[in-house]
Amino acid sequence: MKEKNKYQSRRDFVRKAGQVLVVAPLVALPVALARKTNASGYVWQIDPFKCTQCGQCKTNCVKTPSAVKCYHAYPMCGYCDLCGGYLRQGVKTINTAAENQLCPTGAIIRQFVEEPYFEYTIDEDLCDGCGKCVMGCKDFGNGSLYLQINQGLCDNCNDCLIARKCPSNAISRVPADYQYIPKEKDGVLHK
Amino acid sequence: MMFCIFGMVKRFWRMISRRNNIIIITFAAIVFAALLVWWLTDDHYPSDIAIRLPGMDNRPKPEPRSDSVVIGEFFDTLNNFDEYVSGSWPRFRGEWFDNICRDTTPLAESWDPSGPPVVWKVTLGEGYAGPAVFNGRVYLMDYNERRKADMLRCFSLKSGTELWRRWYNVDIKRNHGYSRTIPAVTDKYLVTIGPRSHVMCLDPVSGDLKWTIDMEKDYEIPGKVKGRITPDFYSGQCPLIDDNVAVLAPGGKALMIGVDCETGNILWKTPNPDTLRMSHTSIMPMVIHGKKMYVYNAIGGVCGVSAEGEDKGKLLWQTTQWSPATVAASPLLLRNNEIAVFGSYGAGGAKIRISFNGSDYSASVIESHKAMEGISSDQQTPIITGDYIWSVLPENAGPLKRQLVSYHLSDLRQTVWTSGKDNRYGRGLGPYIVKGDKLFLLDDDANLFFFKLEGPSASLIARYVITDGIEAWGPMAIAGNYLIMRDSKNLVCLFIGKNGLS
């Protein structure tokens, strides 16, 4: 009885092992391939540290206005009165008059906080992703403004046009779990 | 019969056609009206058109400050002076206003990979104020965040021991740091300007207070933006002592003033008809057409004020053709009675020619360019060595951004030499200083670059990491064997002499 059981056990083991070896890839391979080919796990995003604010995001995105929007890293902001991201170069007076504002659509809202600080917030509905404010902020300020693809607006095209046109290769697919690349050191995206 | 039928059909067709016309016209009118209603009522834009006017940020009206500052109120004696060592850097841009150390003390040619030895290091309040060195003492106009006080600190050059402090409470908020200015010191007087334009004159050895001026209070034109004294980001003007007279440029009620260093009496005042404002630049003495004058690049224009003779303090010339919103680099004298001026925030640079007809002076901008078209500097004043002018170009200078570059004095648009796209220095905001044929350059992160100058070109000898600080924007000083530099929170004295650290 013992010998029989031992003999059957080995045979069963080999048989079962063979079955697992045959069945496992048959099950796992399609799952793995499906996961790999399913683009929904990835989204397009701009690396703010590579972005050169060339303006292509505004004009090449299939969405109108572009799904690319300006975001603000508040912990990096100097809250300056003379803000390079808000004001056009060489303005003679610092105020909210249209002729002094750098943003062509008036998407940056400036509010007095306390002497000498002003807070700048982005109106996403107005922002068209031109990046002019981002360049101004980078050149003359702390670089707290930066561009990101708003995942709520992005169609996540298979062949993203702005990724194709981006001269600095700043746009790539990132895992959907990490769909934004915040500039803040704390890694928290501030809208 | 056939004609009859044809006539009936024709009449019927006409009737139908007329009716169709009416129907079509009526239908078209309804459609048009519907479209018009839709057009007028529907929102065709992402948002309603908003008129953007001044005052939408709720900025309060400027009001005179109610706080009263007792300038130079407190004094702390901390340590005795230990030992004199030679070396002098008595003011902004040194003794000859050119940022070149002409001291004959020989420099070491190289150091080990850790860089020149650190002789001493002290912690400062956040800011960009640079040191002045005289008679073995280092003076620095600091801001103490805990006490909320402007604080003139005096250190021993040899050891960094703090000897005394003269300070006064002035409550200011951090706005890209606090301190910005460099004191001016002679053997008898020491003059400082604080972040909010408070002026002190002291005895440089004992620290005894001689006199003070509150430029905001005395020269402000209340209620007028053009009458404001302290510029955005606080005062960056470094004082000048010329022949025992402190020369200051408050703007507002007086373009420039001369103050007797001994008594504090105002010796002369230059009227300010165009209400030029204080900028972050400093007054530069120059000799133009054989006449010594104080040249100042204010907000709103550039001016020259007589610095000698009977007409001392008289406005000799002024131009508003060059008036960037913000200027930090001071004017430089070129050749042929021309001066170079620089604007911040992408304003670029310009060349101004001063003309003299035998009795009057006049100034005109003969060339101007944007930052990517020629020499520019957002913060530091360029240096002239021989026929060449050196600068680290700002962030918005196109392909040359953040590069060390040189231009011939005759052409401020075409570079003669550039450090190359692989050699950029921070954000182009750090200071640089020359001694002999060596140039020390500090990038924003306090990395010290050591160059050898050969005519219009510079070859990098070494790079050293001195501190792990940020915003190392304060101008450096070289005095004897020592180079004194800072980042936003630390003052560091390096031994750069050839003959070893004793």
Image (cartoon, helix red, strand yellow):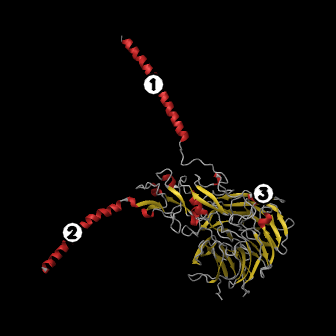
Secondary element at image label 3: loop
- Residue A79 at x, y percent in the picture: 62, 63
Subunit of mark 1? B
Left or right: A71 as drawn, with respect to B301? left
Badge 3: residue crowd in 10 Å (few <14, some 14–19, many ≥20):
some
Indicate the amino acid at tag 2.
Gln
Mark 3 or mark 1, which is nearer to you?
1
Image vertical order of residue A63 relative to residue B386, above or below: above
Q: B390 or A30, which lies in front?
A: A30
Secondary element at image label 2: helix
- Residue A170 at x, y percent in the picture: 48, 62
Point out which mark residue B274 bears.
3
Mark 3 or mark 2, which is nearer to you?
2
Q: What residue occupies the far front of the structure in this picture?
A: A1
Badge 2: residue crowd in 10 Å (few <14, some 14–19, many ≥20):
few
Q: Residue at x 72, y 78 (%)?
A: B153
Image vertical order of residue A176 relative to residue B425, above or below: above
Q: Which residue is mark 2?
A: A19
Point out which mark residue B20 bears.
1
Image vertical order of residue B232 relative to residue A101, above or below: below
Indicate the amino acid at tag 3.
Asp
Task: Indicate the quadrant containing the N terminus of chain B: top left, top right, bottom left or bottom right.
Answer: top left
Secondary element at image label 1: helix
Q: What residue occupies the far bottom of the structure in this picture?
A: B502
Same chain, marks 2 and 1?
no
Same chain, marks 3 and 2?
no
Q: CA distance from mark 2 to mark 1?
A: 81 Å
Q: B472 or B71, which lies in front?
A: B71
User: What is the total number of numbered labels drawn onto the structure image?
Assistant: 3
Sequence-first tag of 3 and 1: 1
Q: CA distance from mark 3 to mark 2?
A: 95 Å
Indicate the amino acid at tag 1.
Asn
